[in-house]
Amino acid sequence: MNVSVSLWSYVSLINKEMSVCEVIQHMHQHGIKYVELLDTFLKTDEDRLKAKKMIDQLGMQVASYSISNNFVCDENTRKAQVEMVKQACQYAKMFNTKTIRVFCGDVCEGYDFDKAFDLIVKSFKECVKVAEKEDIYYCLENHGQLAGKSKQIEAVIKAVGSKHLKATTDTGNFMLVGENPLEAVRYLKDYVGLVHFKDFALVRKEEAQYIGNQGTIFAKGTIIGEGQTPLKEIVEFLDSIDYAGCISIEYEGVIRLDYIEKSIKNTLAFVNE
């Protein structure tokens, strides 16, 4: 397994206190060889070229070119989103990665998972045609209330019916929908293409950074290894099934460089034990 860090771990710092290239340098200085890029921070060709130049100079690799798509919307917007997801294959090739993190979409009026299911599957079936041609793998994240559960991710993957749609198992997000993250990763073991390594602590409502399960679960992000997510056990399980992809740190606690550095150190310790 390889350890990556997502740009999202630095979300409140990027373009305010640090550039994307400075963030990548920070990761490298702390022993990271893989970076998870996010389209939200790379909006132009110039942005992407700058990041690629820095990654190449440091001898690093890209774990995933991760995008934020939403297929649960009006038809014209959905078609534009499908084209955006298809275009991401070219950016992934530019960064020499075969992995693109994707979403199903967001909860909106008139839609729950069951009502949105056909729309989501239809959209991915259109997208995977390009992924199959370009030998790229979309990795669907359990994210939010629309498709946050392991069985929902499995249902979409099975319905699309292409090996070029896999899963991004987000360890913290499972907690927000009331699932045990270890059991969820086990359930999706045949589909895992990327792992978001996130640690959450369950807290009182007034301390919550995230509210899940329709207002019944309250959580906040922590330094990796200091929350309640069974991360060590997840690493051990992934090792037992010979998972050879990336574990990508998506730190979501208070954004401080020393907290990110400690999360990197703790993750490397989990993986190298």
Image (spheres, rainbow, N blue to C red):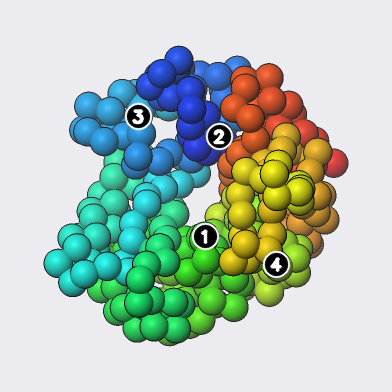
Q: CA distance from mark 1 to mark 4?
A: 13 Å
**Which picture quadrant has residue 239?**
bottom right
Mark 2 crowdedness (10 Å alpha carbons): few <14, some 14-19, many ≥20: many
Residue that carries the numbered disc 2 in the rendered image: 9
Quarter containing the C terminus: top right
Give the left or right position of residue 213, taking residue 134 as reference.
Answer: right
Label 3 or label 4, whichever comes before in sequence order: 3
What SS does tag 3 mark?
helix
Give the left or right position of residue 21, taking residue 202 as reference.
Answer: left
The dot on residue 52 is 3
Residue type of the residue flagged with mark 4: Gly
Closer to viewer: mark 1 or mark 4 = 4
Discs 2, 3 touching: Cβ within 8 Å: no
Tell me if residue 262 can be seen. Answer: yes
- 63 shown above or below 259: below
Residue that carries the numbered disc 1 in the rendered image: 143
Residue that carries the numbered disc 4 in the rendered image: 178
Residue type of the residue flagged with mark 1: His
